[in-house]
Image (tube, grey):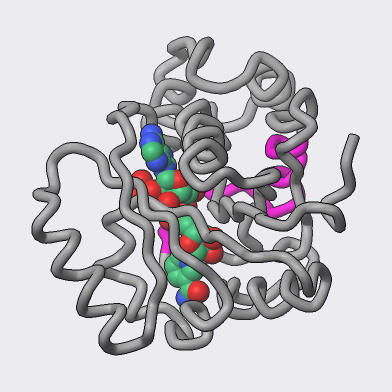
Amino acid sequence: MSDIEDWKKIGIMGGTFNPIHIGHLLLGQWAMEEATLDGVVFIPTGNSYMKDRSAMLPGTERLAMTELAVADRACFRCLDLEVRRGGDTYTYETLEALHTMYPGAQLYFIVGADCLFSIENWYHPEKIFRRCTLLAASRSGMPLETLEKKQKELKDTYGAEIVLTAFPNVEISSTDIRSRRREGRSIQYLVPDSVREYIESNHYYENS
Ligand code: NAP
């Protein structure tokens, strides 16, 4: 199994992962193929300050589920740096840390394309664009011209490198998985079996 230190092109899947699901894993797989990455690191957030945190499991629990989800895939790894860092999670800090840890590697931050319209509100977008290429997965629903216009605008303002590619709609969301748990419905096939067993044995999301 190769070490991340040997990877020249590293994909980064950041997320709240409350919980991680098959859509996240498929997006990681899609990104690997699209950008010929050596592997993808999945990084659960510490404190997602822009999200509703009322139903959010602690970082250590979201990290444990993410570790289980990627355990059987050598080119997928889970990193604990945001959970360990504590405090609000800022992507630019994570990218700076990864640049220090893996100085020779090119970094590709993987996101849903909707993110192009909110990333300027994130902390220090200019530092984010300096450190990585954004791999933006466009799902059907948003016209390609709208995305290309935004891509150009971000290039002109920040010198942003953004790769836009089509990603099939996978109608799975963490919100839906949590509601299913509340309603006593199955989450089989929506999350890896190891994650489902972990959620069920810990009675997660039953009353959230
Ligand atoms: P999330 O909801 O856990 O999702 C992670 C990623 O997977 C998102 O890009 C999401 O795109 C995508 N995704 C989820 N379900 C999908 C599906 N079924 N098919 C395809 N794609 C799917 O993550 P998040 O909380 O939005 O955070 C994403 C990253 O942005 C994290 O690393 C977070 O730290 C970072 N962030 C940083 C700042 C900052 O630095 N200030 C602010 C906000 C977020 P969609 O959201 O489009 O579904």
User: Which residue is painted at 41% across and 78% down in the image?
Assistant: 122
Query: What is the tally of numbered marks visible in this picture?
Result: 0
The answer to whether 16 is drawn above or below residue 100 in the figure is above
Write down the quadrant of residue 131 in the picture: bottom right
User: Compared to 170, does 75 lie above or below?
Assistant: below
Question: Residue 123 at what x, y percent from top left?
Answer: 47, 84
Q: Is residue 110 visible in the rendered structure shown here?
A: yes
Of residues 26 and 102, the one drawn nearer to the viewer in this rendering: 102
- Picture coordinates of residue 9 (x, y %)? 66, 55
Above or below, 101 against 135 in this view is below
Residue positioned 37% across, 65% down in the render? 162
Q: Is residue 81 within the magenta segment?
A: no
Q: Tell me what residue is drawn at x 28 percent, y 30 percent.
A: 169
In the rendered image, the quadrant that contains the N terminus is top right
Q: Residue at x 73, y 70 (%)?
A: 98
Q: Is residue 13 shown left or right of residue 181? A: right
18, 41: nearer the viewer:
41
Please indicate whether residue 51 sits to the left or right of residue 67 in the image: left
Image quadrant in which you'd find residue 175: top left
Q: Is residue 46 left or right of residue 125?
A: right
Which span of residues is magenta-colored? 51-67
Image-based side of 194 in relation to 179, left or right: right
Residue 72, position as x, y percentages in the image = 78, 23
**Residue 57 located within the stretch drawn in magenta:** yes
Residue 65 in the image: x percent, y percent? 70, 35
Q: Is 131 drawn above or below residue 10 in the view shown?
A: below
Residue 49 seen anywhere in this rendered image of the structure: no
